[in-house]
Image: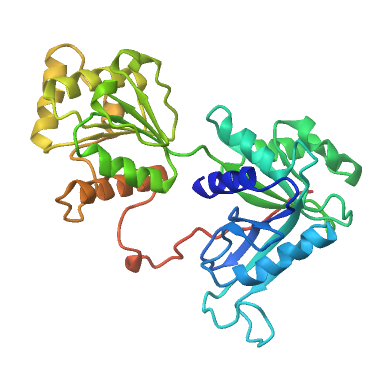
Amino acid sequence: MKEIKNIIRQFDQTPPEEKLALATVVRVEGSSYRRMGARMLVSENGNWVGGISGGCLEGDALKRSRMAILKGKASIITYDTTIDDDHQIGVGLGCNGVIDVLFTPVDRSRADNQIELLKRITGGPRKISKLLKVIRSENSDLLGELLEFTGPESLQILREDGVNIEELDQVIENLDKSKNIHLSDELSLFVEVLPPAYHLILLGHQYDLYPLLRQTIELGWDITVVAPENKVSPMGGVNLMTPEVFDSLEFDDYTAVVLMSHSLHTDKENLRKLSKKKPKYIGMLGPRVRSERIWAELAEEGDAIPADLMQNIYAPVGLEIGANTPDEIALSLLAEVKGVFAQKEIGHLRDKTQPIHERDEPMTFS
């Protein structure tokens, strides 16, 4: 999500007369530094933000983006690092993968162009969005078309190609991860499942709050601090809320909460309130014995933590990386949150016998 936010910011700061193109990874086969959905916004003067690789393909992507701007047409290019060809871009990188990148000019005259659509999604209510991008079509005007999936009505542009809209609607509705869908020999879609940014809610105002804020801002997550206004120094990108409006906070499957007031009573009362919200992640700062005391006191007071919520409580908070300083503890905490939301068994990548990223198998729809 941070990459998308940076692209939107660059788009807004670019003079209206300056032409732009968007490069998007729409298919990955084998290994690749970036996965499907990685983006790169390029201006005609050569400025760019985002990325489609670890830096090895951006030079060629810059040229192809500027070509898309010049021609005013979308194109799709395959970068293959599995073959031994001196003329093939990407050879010698050792990635052993194939990626397709779609290059599309950005039409600023359209209120629903690619960037405006991303802006509307990221600026609207927190939800899982699904974006549809035409990545293969005999109709050059259809190639590169991007729209938000909202039901059968958003698929009408495909009806002329003989697509069963009702069946395709159900297929897309049931997707929980990004997928390539082959509709025919002439027509393919890239369906991108785009969850909202992770939302970190911090209940506390002591000095160890600030390393956590700085690192979370760097990750591009949404941040809310619940504390008295006069206790927290303002920081850009941080939403500050007073404890009195705690009940108005909204939680979803991508919201993490950290109890870090350094007051046993305050943390206990906040946990009591959270038991009704049931967030997917609750981190409790401090030793386990402290958290166990809070749980015991709540139980004695008739507010025992439900068993299903206990599964979402991480106490002590963070991964075991030998963290001692506030900065190291923040790193440990954020890594744990990321792993939990990504539903990963946290460990060393060197111990994995399978690929780091799950391999995508395109879906054939008929």
Q: Is residue 168 left or right of residue 119?
A: right
Q: Is residue 349 left or right of residue 178?
A: left
Picture quadrant where residue 304 is located: top left
- Residue 101: x %, y % from top left: 68, 62
- Residue 89: x %, y % from top left: 65, 78
Residue at 75%, 49% in the rendered image = 17
Q: Is residue 344 left or right of residue 24?
A: left
- Residue 254: x %, y % from top left: 43, 35
Residue at 77%, 65% in the rendered image = 67
Position above or below: 84 against 334? below
Position above or below: 264 against 145? above
Residue at 76%, 43% in the rendered image = 108
Residue at 30%, 58% in the rendered image = 347
Position above or below: 242 against 320? above
Picture quadrant where residue 23 is located: bottom right
13 or 48, nearer to the observer = 13
- Residue 222: x %, y % from top left: 43, 36
109 or 288, nearer to the observer = 109
Q: How many labels sit on residues? A: 0
Picture quadrant where residue 243 is located: top left
